[in-house]
Image (cartoon, helix red, strand yellow):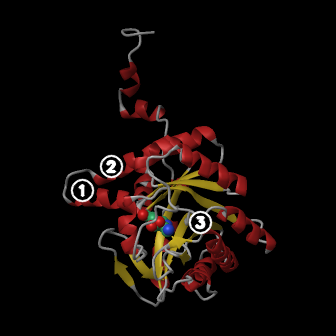
Amino acid sequence: MFFPITRLRRLRLNQNIRDLFTETKVSVNDLIYPMFIITGTKKSEKIESMPGIFRQSIDNALKEIEEVTKYGIKAILLFGIPDKKDDIATGAYSKKGIIQTSVKTIKKEYPDLVVITDLCLCEYTDHGHCGVIHDGYVDNDETLELLSLTALSHAESGADIIAPSDMMDGRVAKIREVLDDNEFHNKIIMSYSAKYSSAFYGPFRDAAQSAPKYGDRKSYQMDPPNVREAIREIEQDIEEGADIVMVKPALSYLDVISAVREEFNHPLAAYNVSGEYSMVKAASKMGWIDEDKVVNEILTSIKRAGADLIITYFAKQIAKSINK
Ligand code: PBG
């Protein structure tokens, strides 16, 4: 049926009519808020490239978590920044490590909050790479051993979801095995399955002090032009036992999110990464965009592309506006 019988503008006549036909809506249940934890007490360090986001000691983080839960956000994603780094990432799997102690403290005060721990070695290695290095190359299988130790320590400290972001082959199977061998059958694995080697992580590496000291991450993170390879990565992680798969970054990879959604029925997360956050904040500071509207449009597009969950530094901001 064509014009003039069909007039698509009829369904856009006013706000109430438009509301009836909204196809995609971001809910607070979709949001995961990332946080950076440092050692010590009463510390809040500004991250210059990420306005509004801080590296905090656990006491201050708890205050922010109170706010996070007040907005109805159900899940946080923790990154730890240790005092000391070495070439085998000892701080990542130490029982007294920054993540292990923080998760325990958070779980004591907020037992129902879903605590997700990012599982990677790059914040804990002195060279800043995501694994053990031999002859300048990140050794996959040796790194798996350290990742599985780390995963177990996260589970023991009470994390609900373990999120490997290292991009080693075979890590999901290895983590599932170590968790199951230790009676952690109900610990969830959210795998950063299709994680691209992206310039959009720039501000995060300032935040987590995790930039590689030499070289780049291209021998383990994915090459941005590839989408069929993303499908293979996701397929592998599902076979290995991932409960949730992820595409990261989100905004320049909406086509990847959509392709994964078409192909699989697994819960799918997308990471609206630091660079995507900082660009919006910068343009907003210049007065060039309407920040809240742009944020809403971005997050809606990620959900429309097919993501069930969105990890975003905008979580509090958007939750506040949804609740209004
Ligand atoms: C750790 C990790 C990174 C991010 C999440 N986990 C950085 C990287 O791979 O270099 C990036 C998150 C962001 O940019 O917001 N490997």
Q: Does label 1 or label 3 sit earlier along the sequence?
A: 3
Which class describes the residues within 10 Å of circle 2: few (<14), some (14-19), or many (20+)? few
The residue that appears at 65% across and 65% down in the rendered structure is 171
Which element carries disc 3, helix, strand or loop?
strand
The residue that appears at 36% across and 57% down in the rendered structure is 276
In the drawing, what numbered circle is on residue 164? 3
Q: Would residue 306 be found to the left or right of residue 153 on screen?
A: left
Q: Does label 2 or label 1 sit earlier along the sequence?
A: 1
The residue that appears at 50% across and 80% down in the rendered structure is 125
Ligand 1 has an atom within 8 Å of the beta carbon of the residue at disc 1: no
Which class describes the residues within 10 Å of circle 3: few (<14), some (14-19), or many (20+)? many
Q: Is residue 299 visible?
A: no
Q: Amino acid at mark 1?
A: Ala
Which class describes the residues within 10 Å of circle 1: few (<14), some (14-19), or many (20+)? few
In the drawing, what numbered circle is on residue 283? 1
Which residue is labeled 2 in the image?
Answer: 294
Q: Does label 3 or label 2 sit earlier along the sequence?
A: 3
Displayed quadrant of residue 56? bottom left
Q: Amino acid at mark 2?
A: Val
